[in-house]
Image (cartoon, rainbow, N blue to C red):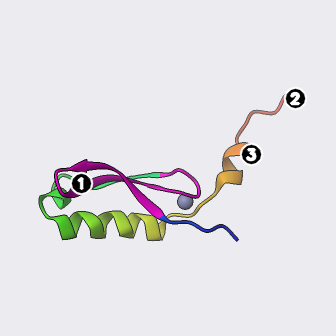
Amino acid sequence: MLKRSIRVTKWLGMVPVVAVCTACGREFKASLTAIRNVADAQETLRLQFAEHKCEPEAKLEQTIEPE
Ligand SMILES: [Zn+2]
């Protein structure tokens, strides 16, 4: 079972604006309205993180196979 956690990669002062999933590398961004407030920005990033699905294997399946 994958152990995933969220990591903030970009800050705007005290406000987290970009975060990534440590398991699949997916990036989450807080909207311009959300970053006006630290709590809103954190909540937005956490929500996106909670709702996404880690699918590292799906990327491999998308590679084009020769006919
Ligand atoms: Zn993930």
Image point (53%, 57%), residue name: 22
Residue bearing the label numbered 3: 61
**What's under tag 3, amino acid-wise?**
Glu
Q: Hey, which quadrant is residue 7 in on the image?
A: bottom left
Q: Hey, which quadrant is residue 39 in on the image?
A: bottom left
Image point (45%, 71%), residue name: 50
Residue bearing the label numbered 1: 31
Instruction: State left or right for residue 24 relative to residue 46.
Output: right
Q: Please report the bounds of the magenta region as a residue range.
A: 6-26
Neighbourhood count class around disc 1 (C-alpha, 10 Å): few under 14, some 14–19, many 20 upward = some
Q: Do the residues labelled 1 and 3 touch (CB within 8 Å)?
A: no
Quick one: label 2 or label 3, which is nearer the N terminus?
3
Where residue 41 sits: x, y (%)?
24, 63
Looking at the rendered structure, the secondary structure element under dot 2 is loop
Q: Are marks 1 and 2 in contact (CB under 8 Å)?
A: no
Distance from disc 2 to disc 3, alpha carbons, whole Å, reads: 15 Å
**What's under tag 1, amino acid-wise?**
Ser
Where residue 4 sits: x, y (%)?
56, 66
Where residue 21 sits: x, y (%)?
49, 57
Instruction: State left or right for residue 22 relative to residue 17.
Output: right
Quick one: label 1 or label 2, which is nearer the N terminus?
1
Q: Does the magenta stretch include residue 15?
A: yes
